[in-house]
Image: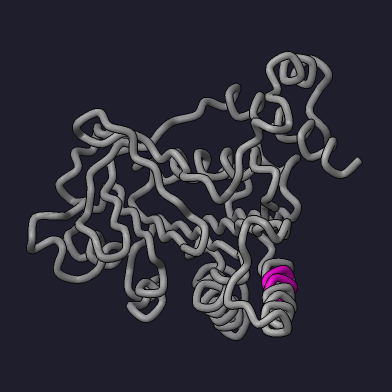
Amino acid sequence: MMPNRRTRRRARRHHPIPGECLSIYDPVHFGTDEYGLPVSVTLIYRNLLCGGEPGSGKSSLLNTIIAHAALSSDCRLWLFDGKLVELGLWRQVADVFVGNDITEAIARLRALQAEMDVRYRQLGAANRRKIVRSDGLDVIVCVIDELAYFSVTVGTNAEQDEFDRLVRDLVARGRAAGIIVIAATQRPSADIIPTSLRDLFGYRVAFRCTTDSSSDIILSVGWAKEGHSAKSVAPEDLGIGLLLAEGGIPRKFKAAFLTDEQIRVIVAHAWIMRDRKSS
């Protein structure tokens, strides 16, 4: 269903000209740090793992990332939403939207894996190691929320294992082919995020956790002992988290927040932009 007429009119009045569209190769605004400085992350060629207790700020960060991707003229959105309502507002501009159906989720991940393999064959034929902006090939941003829903809650053991295997393969091999995986969970435990999977994510964000071990499951074992634990975030400090980039030190920041109305306006902008691109 397309955005309503009133929202589309409002978006057209303020829609940037095509030359001002965002790119997924640009840094993505995450929020501000404890000194009031902006926190931006370049997601291309990277994946991101996000975890924390319910209501801690994961949805805020996911919405900010999806907003940038939706407004990027060189990006396609694949959204997996086990709870249906967390990412539902973006459904109109998603190329693929999967709800609480593990059979469809597996089928879509297999299709994304096949797309990844095609891209690698093309790169191999061109004697190249990764796609670049000048190729004109859309990057695919795959957002999975809630990871635990598909990994341990629904489906048979065989289906859960297949889902995990496909996610692991996409995280391990997808970056150079222009496939970015953003995975989130409110159950940061070893059965949901084994070390072998966590260590494949170049960026990790831990919002408030109830224990130091849960924080370490997201960031990596040992950070809590060095004073970097999401357990220290006060329950009332919604949106406060620790961002760990490859080779860095966890950095405290407050995630940007989009209201439902702001999301609807962004969706209308993105729908117009994508409609122009396809026409």
Q: Which quarter of the figure has residue 122?
A: bottom right
Q: Does residue 54 appear to the left or right of 2 in the view shown?
A: left
Task: Tell me which segment is drawn in magenta.
Answer: 108-113
Q: Which quarter of the figure has residue 125?
A: bottom right
Indicate whether residue 111 is drawn in magenta: yes
Give x and y (percent) for residue 7.
75, 19
Give x and y (percent) for residue 163.
59, 76
Give x and y (percent) for residue 145.
53, 55
In the image, what residue occupies the spot 52% across and 40% down?
63
Q: Is residue 26 above or below residue 98?
A: above
Quadrant location of the N terminus in the rendered image: top right
Q: Nearer the viewer, residue 15 or 253?
A: 15
Q: Is residue 107 above or below residue 258?
A: below
Q: Main secondary structure of the magenta part?
A: helix
Q: Does residue 28 appear to the left or right of 174 in the view shown?
A: left
In the image, what residue occupies the spot 34% across and 54% down?
205
Give x and y (percent) for residue 58.
42, 46
